[in-house]
Image (tube, rainbow, N blue to C red):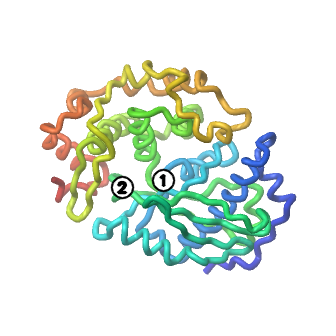
């Protein structure tokens, strides 16, 4: 079992973890980043991560980008168990986290407008409560992996070795970000996707054919929903057609949702820069095969084809029970 009583943090350690020039927002993000490390280590060590996989921007920073990535303040998970609802798992986490103390940090839970938040307080933020959003999604389509957190100087102060953490496969994480960018233009998703494709060592490991297939399937399921036994992926929005050429070329700087763009990086890239990089980095999305072109049109009558394609995904996790 991990012991959390040997954590040795000082104001100097935290200051060195803050991106140069990021000011107060960078300090808050750095404190949350450290508290996330400790919480993830605790959840993995206690077995609560056995049927849960971290995803989203936090997973990209923790497992791939390290200091090169943007700080991500949210904790997004997928429930890796067909027999457990996201609501049940959320309550398991909430009951375990609320009141938890790890080293200098105390964790609390609050709820607002049907969304859960983790509160973080410590002497380093004057016991003010910093909040990070907690979200749970249904069963991941690809088998999650266990991956180590990219080593950073601050980790030496924890007094223990960070364990490998359950996380969704990078292709599935990227596909969800690409699908979201099909209906909106969030700066953080654009930044994360560009960073991945510009890091050759990581980009070369990505199965682009699988990523394209996941993109069209994610967009279709987000449009119409899908069941697999007890799991239900609820429709996230009205039907959304995926036209790769439009996805690449029909995005204007004024369309970019600049939420948290100031903490993406220092200095932060402009909307124009991120848009141009997307065009170059994701041109391969135009290479849809015939089945993918049909599904990309987001017609509900193609449910049979979508089910067939889901059943054929690697790892065979959706081979039966789809409807």
| Rendered view: 213 above or below 18 | above
User: Residue at point 13% right, 43% down?
Assistant: 304
Q: Earlier in the sequence, mark 1 or mark 2?
A: 1
User: Residue at point 52% right, 77% down?
Assistant: 96
User: Viewer-proximal residue, 269 or 3?
Assistant: 269
Q: What kind of element bears circle 2?
A: loop
Alpha carbon separation for disc pair 1 and 2: 10 Å
Look at the numbered discs 1 and 2 and tell me whether their residues touch, using CB distance below 8 Å: yes
Task: Choose top left, top right, bottom left or bottom right for residue 306.
Answer: top left
Residue 220 at x, y percent in the picture: 26, 40
Query: Exactly how many numbered labels are in the figure?
Result: 2
In the shown orientation, is residue 21 left or right of residue 268?
right
User: Residue at point 51% right, 36% down?
Assistant: 186
Q: Is residue 126 visible?
A: yes
Residue 187 at x, y percent in the picture: 55, 35
Quadrant of the image containing the N terminus: bottom right
Res 140 label: 2
User: Viewer-proximal residue, 229 or 314?
Assistant: 229
Q: Is residue 203 visible?
A: no
Residue 205 at x, y percent in the picture: 49, 40
User: Viewer-proximal residue, 58 or 88?
Assistant: 88
Res 55 label: 1
User: Residue at point 23% right, 29% down?
Assistant: 297
In the shown orientation, is residue 62 left or right of residue 158?
left
Task: Choose top left, top right, bottom left or bottom right for residue 91.
Answer: bottom left
Which residue is the extreme one toward the front? 113
């Amino acid at each position: 079992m991990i012991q959390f009583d040997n954590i040795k943090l000082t104001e100097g350690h935290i200051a060195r973890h803050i991106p140069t020039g990021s000011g107060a927002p960078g300090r808050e993000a750095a404190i949350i980043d450290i508290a996330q490390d400790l919480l993830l280590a605790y959840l993995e060590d206690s077995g609560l991560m056995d049927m849960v996989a971290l995803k989203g921007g936090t997973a990209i920073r923790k497992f791939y980008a390290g200091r090169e990535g943007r700080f991500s303040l949210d904790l997004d998970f997928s429930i890796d168990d067909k027999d457990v609802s996201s609501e049940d798992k959320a309550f398991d986490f909430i009951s375990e986290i609320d009141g938890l103390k790890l080293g200098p940090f105390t964790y609390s839970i609050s709820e607002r407008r049907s969304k859960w938040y983790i509160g973080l307080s410590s002497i380093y933020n004057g016991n003010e409560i910093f909040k990070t959003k907690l979200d749970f999604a249904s069963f991941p389509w690809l088998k999650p992996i266990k991956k180590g957190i990219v080593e950073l100087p601050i980790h030496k102060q924890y007094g223990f070795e960070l364990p490998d953490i359950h996380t969704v496969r990078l292709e599935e994480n990227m596909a969800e970000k690409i699908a979201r960018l099909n209906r909106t233009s969030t700066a953080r998703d654009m930044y994360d996707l560009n960073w991945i494709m510009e890091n050759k060592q990581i980009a070369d490991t990505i199965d682009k054919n699988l990523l394209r297939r996941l993109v069209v399937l994610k967009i279709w399921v987000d449009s119409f929903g899908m069941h697999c036994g007890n799991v239900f992926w609820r429709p996230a929005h009205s039907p959304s057609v995926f036209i790769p050429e439009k996805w690449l070329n029909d995005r204007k700087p004024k369309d970019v949702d600049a939420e948290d763009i100031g903490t993406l990086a220092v200095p932060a890239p402009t909307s124009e820069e991120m848009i141009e990089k997307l065009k170059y980095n994701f041109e391969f999305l135009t290479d849809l095969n015939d089945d993918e072109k049909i599904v990309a049109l987001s017609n509900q009558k193609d449910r049979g084809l979508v089910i067939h394609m889901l059943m054929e995904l690697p790892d065979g996790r959706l081979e039966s029970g789809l409807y």
